Image: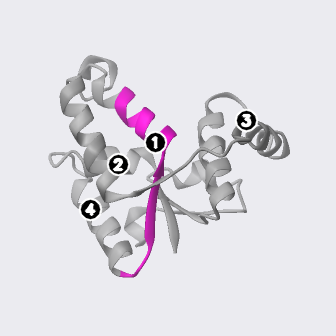
Amino acid sequence: MRTLIDTNVVLRLLDPDHALHMLVANATTTLQNRGATLYVCAQVIIEYWAVATRPRSANGIGMSVTETSANVDVILRSFVLLQEPHDVALAWRKLAESHGVSGKQVHDSRLVTVMLAHGVDHILTLNVADFMRYTEVTAVHPSEV
């Protein structure tokens, strides 16, 4: 199984004090033990950086740039980085139009665009409902692994 790891899973995975840390850690380990290839893409890394460096008062983690950069190194060692397709903007627009995507949903549709470009058919996410409109991929909650 080829599985993209959503930003919300990465955030919990790298925060051992978070209540969902063990759930996501067990899910990723189980998937890897089953032979799944786990991926991230540039958007996941960028979103991770944004949340990690944002102050806690603004719903972030409040990490320094140095700490965040070290965690990005962990992400890149742990998962395969999908390259951005050269036509990501055009492919994304087509997907967004065909699924009626608007507002903040554009971020999820962009993940799906990158997944489809690389033949990745599953996404491990804490927000399964956000991906239900995309019949091209299967969203899996860590508790379902």
Q: Label for residue 65?
A: none
| Residue 62 in view, yes or no | no
Distance from disc 2 to disc 3, alpha carbons, whole Å, reads 24 Å
Foreground: 108 or 43?
43
Queried whether the magenta region covers residue 43, the answer comes back as yes
Please name which of the two marks, 2 or 3, marks the residue nearer to the observer.
3
* Labels 1 & 4 near each other (Cβ < 8 A): no
Distance from disc 1 to disc 2, alpha carbons, whole Å, reads 8 Å
Q: Secondary structure at mark 2?
A: helix
**76 shown above or below 143:** above
Q: Secondary structure at mark 3?
A: helix
| Picture quadrant where residue 53 is located | top left
* Labels 1 & 2 near each other (Cβ < 8 A): yes
Among the two numbered marks 1 and 4 on one chain, the one whose residue lies closer to the N terminus: 4
Label 1 amino acid?
A: Val
Q: Label for residue 44?
A: 1
Distance from disc 4 to disc 2, alpha carbons, whole Å, reads 9 Å
Tell me the magenta residue range: 34-50
Q: Secondary structure at mark 1?
A: helix
**Residue shown at 25%/22% (left/top)?**
56
Residue to which mark 3 is pinned: 89
**30 shown above or below 135:** below
* Labels 4 & 2 near each other (Cβ < 8 A): no
**142 shown above or below 112:** below
* Labels 1 & 3 near each other (Cβ < 8 A): no
